Image (spheres, grey):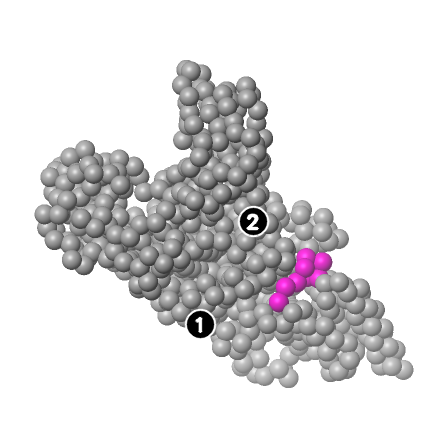
Amino acid sequence: MSDKIIGQIGRVNGPVIQVRGIKEASMMELVYVGEERLIGELVKLDGVTATVQVYEDTTGLTPGENVYGSSLPLSVELGPGLIGSIYDGIQRPLTRLKALSGDTIGRGIFSPALLRSTLWHFIPTLKKGEEVHIGQVVGTVQETSHVNHKILVPISLSTEKEIFTVVSIIKEGDYTVEETIATLQDENGKEHTITMMHTWSIRKARPVKERKPLSVPLITGQRVIDMLFPLAKGGTVAIPGGFGTGKTMTQHAIARWCDADIIVYIGCGERGNEMTDVLREFPRLIDPHTGKSLMERTILIANTSNMPVSAREASIYTGVTLAEYYRDQGFHVAIMADSTSRWAEALRELSGRMEEMPAEEGFPAYLPTRIAEFYERAGRMRTLHDEEGSVSIIGAVSPPGGDFSEPVTQHTKRFVRCFWGLDRALASARHYPAISWLESYSEYVDEVAPWWGQKGDGDWKQSRLEIMNLLQKEVRLQQIVKLVGPDALPDSQNFILEVCNVFKSGFLQQNAFDETDRYSSVEKQLGMLHVILTYWNLGSAAIAKGLPLVRIKRMKVVSEILQMRLKVTDDNLEELDKIIVRLERQISRLGEMYET
């Protein structure tokens, strides 16, 4: 740590302190406060005074104590060893902090994010004399059984031409993250040493070659998401919902079942018991894609509601920076931010302590800018070494009382293209995922339609539109039913209610504890939707010919349609075709009986 004194404490206001006598300091500089060297960040400069937000408990700090500068921005360490780790909001490893200070994290305790003693097996991919550029792969390290970690030429080595010559590179072997693995020479003859780790400012997006169109969906195995409101890889989505509607559980299901390569789970200001469940469950969960522990592709950032509020503000930037690092290696990364409302509340508290002018509901005027800065770091990119990687952001929002008109939800909707609104009535009825098909939407439908067309028979978009239209008609019919009862409707309209009930119970509802139902493959989802639409088309045609609805509802095959989500496994999808055959046969038989 630096011994450069940049000023003295003038006033302490919770996590915000004023520093007087400022010299040789810069905005957003990482600083150390007091003799215990508490970690902080310089967020405001005004002549010879400055404002610092401290990421640890400030109890006991007194005016006159020294503040030390680092001449560096708040940064994270990047290199092998991140996967499977549990960090706080400023990338302090919680497991090692517990070993140092017990169950309660002591103040001023420091442990590096990456262990310096761990040996990693490095395999070089370059040779002496080769020319390389920024972001090119130097070598690889097998970080976990699932993640082949690529060591890249650091972006921080940026020069005028950004072309280097390999002066030396070590042979294959076991090395620590601090050992020199290669020496590069730039166009001016200056030599640069490369290790397996480097640092990067959390508030600065990592550069890429280009942003690519979003055309491939992030498959989650949750039918209401994949079929009705798809999220593209590199896309952004908000999950707003009141207390108990299932935001956290929805994110848990997506984290486990989605086809992203890496998961970054950010517990931002959530209750300690919820994060405890995550920390206990994730190491025990088996990744369905690899058969290994889910932690072999997961990074956890835990910054609960009883931890320093300013570290909560930094936690989402820490998480997205780690995600960008793996994206630059060509991985598809999914971020679970739970929840951005708690992060916004941290902004509000810090803004109030800094005596800034409040905007709506006390939030700072720059809240929309900060939300946009976070979500705009998502995307599907062409990396500097010409690979494809993506960062998808799935942000939970916790509006007080489930009020979607509050500022955080409204501003978030401006910057995301997908919205999975959770409905308290569905959650109360134990319909999970409790994603409302009336309030939710996805602007990625047109982009991912060609991909779905290749997987199915080319009519996914039309099938989705057809079932969505039925759900909209059901809402209007339900209003009539509440006034005059279902008997006042003709069979053709009552059949719309029937099909929508079958769709909601037999398709949209999903049991996370059932081995068959908790995940649905793309093929099973397409097949199930085809079955329900066949039921609609054949049934409506039969009713138009005079067949009573009550006879259709009593068909044995209807119960099979309701149970297919539980009975039909992904390796036995031909059973869906058999259901359609039985459906056609039974409706045909009913038609013949009614005609005679």
- In the image, 213 versus 462, the foreground residue is 213
Identify the element where label 1 is drawn.
Answer: loop
- Give the residue number, with chain letter if any, for mark 1: 244
Residue 206 coordinates in the image, percent (x, y): 44, 37
Residue 378 coordinates in the image, percent (x, y): 48, 45
Start-end of magenta stretch: 518-525
| Amino acid on which the number 2 mark rests in the picture | Thr
Identify the element where label 2 is drawn.
Answer: loop
Lower position in the chain sequence, tag 1 or tag 2: 2
Residue 558 coordinates in the image, percent (x, y): 74, 76
- Give the residue number, with chain letter if any, for mark 2: 144
Left or right: 69 in relation to 584: left
Who's the residue at 58% across and 56% down the image? Answer: 258
Left or right: 17 in relation to 147: left
Q: Which mark is residue 520?
A: none
| Amino acid on which the number 1 mark rests in the picture | Gly
Who's the residue at 48% across and 28% down the image? Answer: 182
Tell me where residue 274 sits by quadrant.
bottom left
